Image (cartoon, rainbow, N blue to C red):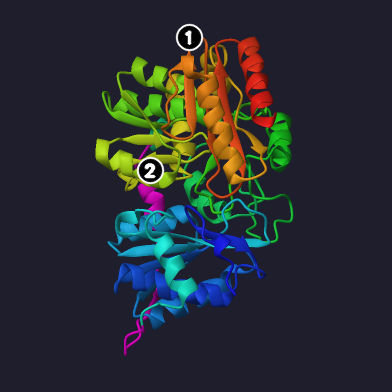
Amino acid sequence: MINPSVFKAYDVRGLYPSEITEEVFYQLGRAFVAYLGPGKYAVTRDMRVSSPSLTKAFIDGAVKQGGTIIDYGMLGTDQMYFAVAADDLDGGAQVTASHNPGQYNGCKMVRKEAFPLSGDAGIKEMKEMILAGSIPAPPASPGTVEQRQVLDRYVEHVMSFVDERAIKPCNVVLDAGSGVAGIVAPPLFDRLPCKTTRLCFEVDGTFPNHEANPLIEENRRDITAEVVNQKADIGIAWDGDADRCFFLDGTGEFIAGDFVTALLAENILLKHPGETIIYDVRASYAVKDVVARYGGKALMNRVGHAFIKRRMREENGIFGGEVTGHYYFRDNFYADNGFIPALMILELMSKKNLSLRDLLKPLREKYFISGEINTTVASMDVAATKIAELRTRYADGNPYDLDGVSAEYPDWHFNVRQSNTEPLLRLNLEGLTPEIMEKRRDELLDLIRG
């Protein structure tokens, strides 16, 4: 019996082998091709111990259903996106559980031009086919499989986003988290004049050092200590499938994703004035203020990669950023990427001749953010009720419902939204002083948890 809960808002994901099995992935491969139709599809996989057998099962199902599969081997999600778009394929699948611990696995899927399948479009239909046993009968002739390489072309593509010669020598600590960044980062950083210290670059799906989720503080212990020890200029860490990167300044302090979004927007607008930048509803005012300062147009959007990518296409946005470390680029087929931001931050430091800490100083002195604070509630219904209560309580803050509930006051603003998959409420809040931020944060948490 397949657990319906493995079908998430943006991917298929669960515990292996209790929820995610080879049989589930065989059916998923069939449903994927049945949904998108006969065509050519990229398949890549991460380094998890279960990924080879799950990938084989997915490919077997896709081929049975008549799909032509191009197997690009062990790579990150970014490289799957690139392969689909650059090789003009009809879609693609990455076998990965992203930042989750080693006992999890899953699959991220896209259609043509690397546009994501989601719970609203694609994953829902595949789930229904699989659970009802109603996948259409396969064609008389199965599809085929071929192997192909894409990494060298991908490296050239990523390098095209920066002026390689502008990047000055600096001291960089990198942490691949035993994930696929250990494959992708070396050919990129070998071309730069930077001194690099490389942690956890041996690809290992048992995660012998720490989990590949840099958002959790304990997973940053190694890189933080090494940045301080080396007196490095910057630390850069990736999650398991390397579609997100995270930054530390020279003191080892972790940098919020909305501040990174602001810096990346600055870099882009210096080269491309007047362009449109998309940012998510949780973000610091730093983003829209920096975009305005550099002559761009900032548009707030609902959280989630399917929504950001769609809005970027609609508005011809050059760049989009989410506070969770997803950064999207028009010239990267509107997809997110974990390596372009790393090079762009190094380029901005070089061009301004400032350390990362100095680049961030004006933001840190003006914007005081809570970061995302999660609260578990009794049920999804309770979460919805709490959001309705907050809308009433803060009616004088012109509340809006773009994603959950948000309200804005002259000296602070907040967003509270519900998780797509579990009874969780997520609070993001910003104040013009640390005292205002802390007071309002505690006030909101009391209401949420009361």
Is residue 286 inside the magenta stretch? no
Q: Which mark is residue 285?
A: none
Residue 254 visible in the shown view: yes
* Residue 68, quarter of the rendered image: bottom left
Rendered location of residue 233, percent (x, y): 60, 28
Rendered location of residue 220, percent (x, y): 69, 39
Q: Are marks 1 and 2 in contact (CB under 8 Å)?
A: no
Is residue 157 inside the magenta stretch? yes
Residue at image point 28% right, 42% down: 313
416 above or below 438? below
Numbered disc 1: secondary structure? loop
Q: How many marks?
A: 2
Rendered location of residue 186, percent (x, y): 53, 50
Instruction: Say what amino acid the circle numbered 2 marks.
Output: Phe
Residue at image point 52% right, 47% down: 420
Task: Pick whichever, 147 or 305, lies toward us.
Answer: 305
Q: Quadrant of the C terminus?
A: top right
Crowding at mark 2 (Cα within 10 Å: few <14, some 14-19, many 20+) = some
Rendered location of residue 127, percent (x, y): 46, 66
Instruction: Say what amino acid the circle numbered 1 marks.
Output: Pro
Q: Quadrant of the N terminus?
A: bottom right
Q: Which residues are magenta?
A: 137-163
Task: Pick whichever, 117 or 320, lies toward us.
Answer: 117
Residue 46 visible in the shown view: no
234 above or below 3? above
Question: Residue beneath label 1, please?
Answer: 410
Question: Residue beneath label 2, please?
Answer: 307
Task: Pick whichever, 364 or 168, lies toward us.
Answer: 364
Q: Earlier in the sequence, mark 1 or mark 2?
A: 2
